[in-house]
Image (cartoon, rainbow, N blue to C red):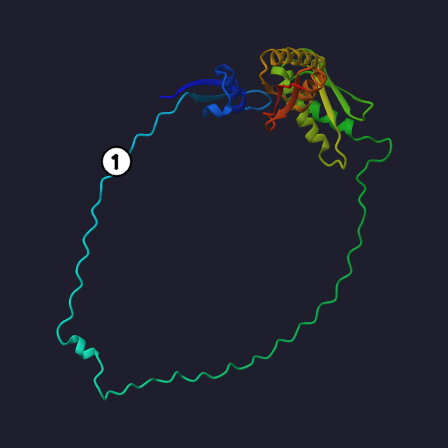
Amino acid sequence: MRKFVETTGRSEEDAISAALYQLGLDRDDVSVEVLERAKSGFLGFGSSPAKVRVYYGPEEEDQPVFKPEVKQPEPKPEPKPEPGQEEKNTLQPGDQIILAAPPRREPPKKQPRPQPKPRPEPKPAPERREVQTQPPAGDDPVPPKIEAFLTGLMEHLEVQAKPDISVTPEGNYRVVLQGQNLGAIIGRRGETLDAIQQLTSYSVNRGLSKRVRIHVDAENYRAKREESLRRLAVKVAGKVVKYRKNIALEPMNAYERHVIHTALQDYPGVSTYSTGVDPNRHTVVAYSTK
């Protein structure tokens, strides 16, 4: 009987990676059964991890299946013709054979060709009217939309926080939520803050001809998280070089994956790449001989 282990993770791939790391095996050496799928919840609340069962070890050999031998029925002898029957079917001398001529077919009548219908004259195309989608110069509608959306969202979440909006040199919008006890809107590893940032981006970019980027922060969490990711990247890279084995990190958003790639782009002996599909896309730190 094959052996198995059960592991959990934020996603099915994360749980499988944990089992492979625990067993020291590759993906092709095991078979996986998903027991419970991960639930993301809403704004980080009500989420639950994924649970998988990973089987490993030699498989049982198939037992030969006994198939009973089925006897085929013996063919029945054909009945012999009665005496005199063959004589009735044979022709006698002097019999005449009459061949019937095939019926005469009349040639098909020619159908008159249909006359082509006159083509209607093309209608002139309607004149295009240009619709002004860009706001007048000096009137930026983005900051009022950001403030209105986040103010309503904070009231719905019963959090006393006000948005402080500024524009970066690259033309992006940076929003800092000012208030006290903002840990509830940051969430575990910034999951709730990322959800608020995505909802704000969807709401503000609706109806705009050109998409704008919006970064939402609270209590300087982004800078602290970036420094923590750099330390994590260096620590994992040291293990990869020491054990010469690839290590997959937890799922991250695009910005956090970019921090990992940037931190290890000049680290000798390792390379990084991302795999998977959002929101379970994660970065892999791989051993490299280059």
Q: Residue at x 67, y 26 (%)?
A: 198
> Mark 1 sits on what residue?
66
| Left or right of 127, for residue 271 | left
Front residue of this view, candidates 251 and 272:
272
Residue 149, compared with residue 244, is above or below; it is below
Q: Secondary structure at mark 1?
A: loop
Percent x, y for residue 104? 43, 85
Residue 252, compared with residue 133, is above or below; it is above
Q: Residue at x 81, y 25 (%)?
A: 170
Front residue of this view, candidates 264 and 136:
264
Residue 127, compared with residue 28, is above or below; it is below
Quarter that holds the C terminus: top right
Quarter that holds the N terminus: top left
Percent x, y for residue 237? 64, 13
Front residue of this view, candidates 95 and 204:
95
Given the current orientation, which residue lies at the most extreme front position?
Answer: 93
